[in-house]
Amino acid sequence: MRKSSGFLISEDQIRQRITELASQIEKDFMGEVPILVGILKGSFVFLADLMRKLNMDVQVDFLGVSSYGKSTKTSGIVKILKDLGTSIEGRDVILVEDICDSGLTLKYIVDLLRSRKPRTIKVCVLLDKKERKVVNINLDYVGFEVPDRFLVGYGLDYGERYRNLPYIRELFPEELSEAESDEK
Ligand code: PRP
């Protein structure tokens, strides 16, 4: 594995930004008990750290979706693999996602959950690849705007690997092909 340079968000940077996001959410939802909805699988690391920084009552649920499979490109097809376990009708929902790329996954999920009549839906993403958007999607809380590079770590995978890295880094072209050939 290459040691080097390339785009990186360190553990410290992530920790500090999550503290800021949490204090913004506390202010916005003062006196309420929002439901944090983590979008699996990628968001579980971010969600776990974010909720522990929230000094307020929250509930947690998960939605299991898959849009990429093993490919590095979005298919635009969102499959619901696991639905919510609780009703969100009349509730404040905060969708928690690791990364918004084309925006197709979040757009699909926001539209789906809106039909279940929550009181409000907000979207919290750790990473936003702004330049890749193909749909209009409002992101209420954004950790970092990131360049159009293939990123792994802190929940983000490539072919199900790298999710356990405690930081976020760029995956280099030679690593992409290594991972692809491992899967054959
Ligand atoms: C990733 C990520 C988002 C989606 C973003 O999920 O977690 O859900 O892609 O892409 P988009 O904005 O172009 O729709 P992925 O399908 O890789 O599944 P995972 O969370 O299980 O890794």
Image (tube, rainbow, N blue to C red):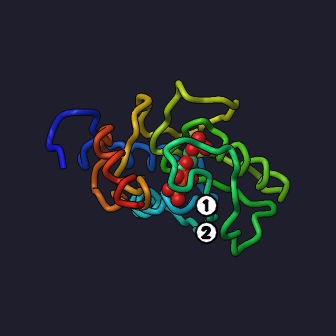
Q: In 3D space, how far apart are the residues under numbered discs 1 and 2 (Cα atoms)?
A: 5 Å
Q: Quadrant of residue 76?
A: top right
Secondary structure under the numbered disc 2 in the rendered image: strand
Residue 14 percent across, percent down from the top left: 32, 46
Using residue 68 as the reference point, say whether residue 155 is left or right of it. Answer: left
In the image, what residue type sits under mark 1? Val
Rendered location of residue 73, percent (x, y): 54, 41
Judged left or right of residue 183, residue 68 is right
Image position, residue 9 (x, y; %):
29, 40
The outermost residue toward the left is 3
Q: Looking at the rendered structure, which numbered label has been put on residue 54?
A: none
Side of 136 where 3 appears, left or right? left
The image quadrant that residue 52 belongs to is bottom left
Q: Is residue 21 left or right of residue 11?
A: right
Q: Are marks 1 and 2 in contact (CB under 8 Å)?
A: yes
Residue 96 visible to an observer of this rendering: no
In the displayed structure, would residue 125 be above or below residue 56? above
Q: Residue at x 60, y 35 (%)?
A: 102
Image point (18%, 34%), residue name: 5
In the structure shown, which secondary structural element does the residue marked by tag 1 occupy?
A: strand
Is 111 drawn above or below residue 8 in the view shown? below
Nearer to me, 64 or 174: 174
State whether residue 56 appears in this view. Answer: yes
Q: Earlier in the sequence, mark 1 or mark 2?
A: 1
Question: Looking at mark 1, is its residue's CB closer than 8 Å to ligand 1?
Answer: no
Q: Is residue 64 above or below residue 95?
A: below
- Write the residue at 69% across / 75% down: 85
Q: What is the tally of numbered marks visible in this picture?
A: 2
Residue 40: x %, y % from top left: 55, 62
| Residue of label 1 | 37
Which residue is labeled 2 in the image?
Answer: 61
